[in-house]
């Protein structure tokens, strides 16, 4: 695709944005005095900030460009990643799980596992999360550098170093508050960049109805306009597989696993100023999440209609949004859109490093390496780990640039670690009897289950292939539908984890119930204030109301776009 | 469930020394000594949280949108007809610029109408309410 025609004014807007990013880091530094200030924002942030940061941390540029690419390649089915694949999990996190996370005062997700189970479980989860976070940071950086090279002509290494440099400055100075504040800023700048693009694009094709007609005439065809078409169990034709995979694999296991146990997300809720704000964090985030597909999937559809041979000679699917930007946006608005894209890239990396440094400092370093030091020591460790984390991210980015297939492989492997986590958590929070050894056994079994399904079962199971017949790709790999395999592997992981957890629980001894206070349903927290002394919140702050409303909207939209 | 009375200065993880009761409670909870708050009596007074000094983000966001909005609006006066035609006939810079100015005003108004509350004074921490 052609480079963008960027002029001095666009660069000026970009420079203003980057100056503000640094300024936020500097100002946030004034609010850092303890390690908890640095790593958890001193648990002081209001719900609207944490709520927007919650989705913004996930709204990296890979997400934006990737979802647009999916929109171009698969059509409206892509919304499953949002409506099924995010909102129910976010509602569940806010209403059901947050009282355990926030009320128990754990400082990280692995720490919950330590208090609930034992050290092996803690270490397994902490280490796999830490390494995965660094991998993701690097992948984010590399993906950004590739896009910048295509758009602006900068060499890949320059983009990596410059972007990492900015992130390094504002999160080392400002800690988590610097990261979160910039994530919120990034959210609004992304809106400012993408909303004009969608409006102009729709206007140019003649509106939504005209877009639908034109999509029907592309290779995508009418199935591209239906979300559930072709998802019958038995002979699925939908690009995301059958509805069992979509609902149970994506909607339940993977989605809940990510949104309720990934510390990069949960951390944003833990930094809220009280339990009510923490509970509302994912709920407030759910509402923008419902409507963001309008800014990613619609450009994808526009791209498949307006750009000839997209996906082959017309440029990779990933270039959908950049090509539309170059096509429609005048200098000025283009600068704003570019600022949004670059902001998204940086924030994706910052979210990963800021959650990595917390887990490394509190769980790994304070937990196992240097224990009884004063808080100032851990504050310094947090800062040093942040710098090292960014450097590791840069390193990973360079590895990705040279060995992108290996990177995809490594990410696949880490997906296996994530798949069973939700099973362990849900059992942990609702079954007092679950024993510490069941914790680690379940996680290990689930991980093995996902890997076994991916490598041993899927290539030999015709149902995993388009057309339900086993065949090979031109390069010799199994021609499976990667999405349905991913979803079914997740279901396998969940089941394996749950079964092993139950079996091991029945064979080992649980912790005394007194040690589970605040961690499990049914074990009262002796430190919680007497309910009769507590004020009722205003109606619009009720988590159940907010959560119910979000689910209702998703249901209505799902029916409209059936 | 409501706004708990716990203060915004979360100093329990700083160097305040614990009472015997606290230590006993932690032992019974099986938290383990690696998660006791670090003991450093000399730093007791200094190390309370400074999180209350965090600035109001709405002013920053509003400020950025205001600057962007004004610059874009001025720049839009120099747009050529060809550029406007490229954006499906919409004078994008002008509209985006004006919208951003409006957003800026909304943020400033919001910050004015519901100002960031100053922190409550530090008290011994209670864990927040669990529903």
Image: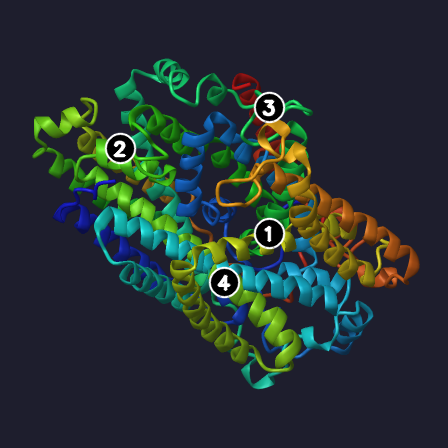
Q: Secondary structure at mark 2?
A: helix
Q: Secondary structure at mark 1?
A: helix
The reply to the same-chain question for discs 2 and 1 is no
Cα–Cα gap, marks 2 and 1: 42 Å
Which is nearer the eye, A456 or A80? A456
Cα–Cα gap, marks 4 and 2: 38 Å
* Count of numbered marks: 4
| Mark 2 Cα-neighbour bin, 10 Å: few <14, some 14–19, many ≥20 | some
* Residue A395 falls left or right of residue A51: left
From the image, state whether disc 4 or disc 1 is nearer to you. Answer: 1
Residue at x 48%, y 26% (from the top left corner): A76
Residue at x 65%, y 22% (from the top left corner): A232
Residue at x 22%, y 44% (from the top left corner): A335
- Give the residue pinned by disc 3: A555
- Residue A236 in the image: state x and y as whole percent: 62, 25
From the image, state whether disc 4 or disc 2 is nearer to you. Answer: 4
**Residue A556: image tag:** none
Chain letter of the residue carrying label 4: A
Which is nearer the eye, B34 or B20? B34
* Residue A230 falls left or right of residue B101: right
Picture quadrant where residue B126 is located? bottom right
Q: Secondary structure at mark 3?
A: helix
- Give the residue pinned by disc 4: A134
Decide which of tag 1 and tag 3 comes sooner along the chain.
1
**Residue B99: image tag:** 2
- Give the residue pinned by disc 1: A415
Whether the residues at callouts 3 and 2 have beta carbons within 8 Å, the answer is no
- View extreme (bottom): residue: B42
Chain letter of the residue carrying label 3: A
Whether the residues at callouts 4 and 1 have beta carbons within 8 Å, the answer is no
């Amino acid at each position: 695709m052609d480079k963008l025609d960027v002029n001095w004014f666009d660069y000026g807007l970009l420079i203003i944005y980057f100056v503000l990013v640094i300024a936020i880091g500097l100002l946030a530094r004034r609010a850092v005095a303890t390690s908890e200030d640095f790593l958890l924002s001193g648990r002081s942030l209001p719900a609207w900030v944490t709520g927007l940061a919650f989705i913004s941390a996930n709204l990296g540029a890979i997400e934006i460009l990737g979802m647009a690419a999916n929109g171009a390649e698969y059509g409206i089915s892509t919304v499953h990643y949002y409506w099924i694949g995010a909102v129910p999990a976010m509602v569940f996190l806010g209403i059901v799980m947050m009282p355990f996370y926030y009320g128990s005062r754990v400082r990280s997700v692995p720490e919950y596992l330590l208090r609930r189970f034992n050290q092996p479980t803690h270490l397994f989860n902490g280490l796999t999360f830490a390494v995965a976070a660094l991998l993701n940071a690097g992948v984010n950086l590399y993906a950004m550098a590739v896009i910048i090279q295509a758009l602006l002509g900068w060499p890949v290494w320059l983009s990596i170093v410059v972007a990492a440099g900015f992130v390094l400055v504002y999160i080392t100075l400002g800690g988590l508050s610097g990261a979160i504040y910039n994530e919120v800023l990034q959210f609004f700048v992304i809106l400012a960049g993408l909303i004009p693009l969608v409006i102009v694009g729709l206007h140019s094709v003649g509106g939504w109805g005209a877009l639908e007609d034109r999509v029907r005439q592309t290779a995508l065809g009418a199935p591209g306009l239906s979300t559930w078409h072709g998802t019958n169990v038995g002979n699925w034709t939908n690009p995301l597989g059958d509805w069992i995979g979509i609902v149970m694999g994506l909607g339940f296991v993977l989605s809940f696993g990510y949104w309720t146990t990934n510390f990069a997300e949960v951390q944003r809720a833990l930094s809220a100023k009280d339990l009510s704000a923490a509970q509302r964090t994912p709920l407030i985030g759910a509402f923008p999440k419902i409507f963001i597909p309008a800014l990613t999937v619609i450009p994808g559809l526009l791209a498949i209609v307006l750009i000839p041979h997209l996906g082959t000679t017309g440029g990779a699917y990933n270039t959908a949004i950049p090509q539309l930007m170059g096509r429609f946006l005048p200098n000025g608005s283009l600068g704003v859109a570019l600022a949004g894209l670059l902001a998204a890239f940086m924030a994706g990396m910052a979210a990963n490093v800021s959650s990595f440094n917390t887990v490394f400092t509190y769980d790994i370093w304070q937990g196992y390496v240097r224990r009884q030091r004063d808080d100032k020591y851990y504050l310094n460790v947090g800062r040093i780990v942040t710098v090292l984390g960014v450097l590791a991210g840069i390193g990973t980015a360079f590895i990705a640039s040279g060995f992108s297939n290996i990177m995809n492989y490594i990410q696949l492997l880490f997906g296996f670690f994530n798949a069973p986590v939700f099973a362990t958590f849900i059992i942990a929070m609702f079954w007092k009897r679950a024993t510490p050894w069941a914790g680690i056994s379940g996680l290990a079994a689930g991980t093995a289950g996902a890997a076994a399904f991916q490598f041993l079962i899927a290539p030999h199971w015709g149902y995993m292939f388009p057309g339900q017949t086993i065949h090979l790709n031109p390069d010799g790999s199994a021609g499976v539908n990667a999405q349905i395999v991913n979803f079914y592997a997740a279901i396998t992981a969940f089941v394996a984890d749950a079964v092993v957890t139950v079996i091991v629980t029945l064979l080992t001894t649980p912790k005394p119930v007194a040690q589970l206070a605040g961690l499990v349903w049914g074990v009262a927290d002796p430190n919680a204030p007497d309910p009769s002394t507590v004020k009722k919140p205003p109606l619009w702050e009720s988590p159940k109301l907010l959560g119910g409303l979000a689910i209702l909207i998703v249901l209505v939209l799902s029916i409209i776009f059936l | 469930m409501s706004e708990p009375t716990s203060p915004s200065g979360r100093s329990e993880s700083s160097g305040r020394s614990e009472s015997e009761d606290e230590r006993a409670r932690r032992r019974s909870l099986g938290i383990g000594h690696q998660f006791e708050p670090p003991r450093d009596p000399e730093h007791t007074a200094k190390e309370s949280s400074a999180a209350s000094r965090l600035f109001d983000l709405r002013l920053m966001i509003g400020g950025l949108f205001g600057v962007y909005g004004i610059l874009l609006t001025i720049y839009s006066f120099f747009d050529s007809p060809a550029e406007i035609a490229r954006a499906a006939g919409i004078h994008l810079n002008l509209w985006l610029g004006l919208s951003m100015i409006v957003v800026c005003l909304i943020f400033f108004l919001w910050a004015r109408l519901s100002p960031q509350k100053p922190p409550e004074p530090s008290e011994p921490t209670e864990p927040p309410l669990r529903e």
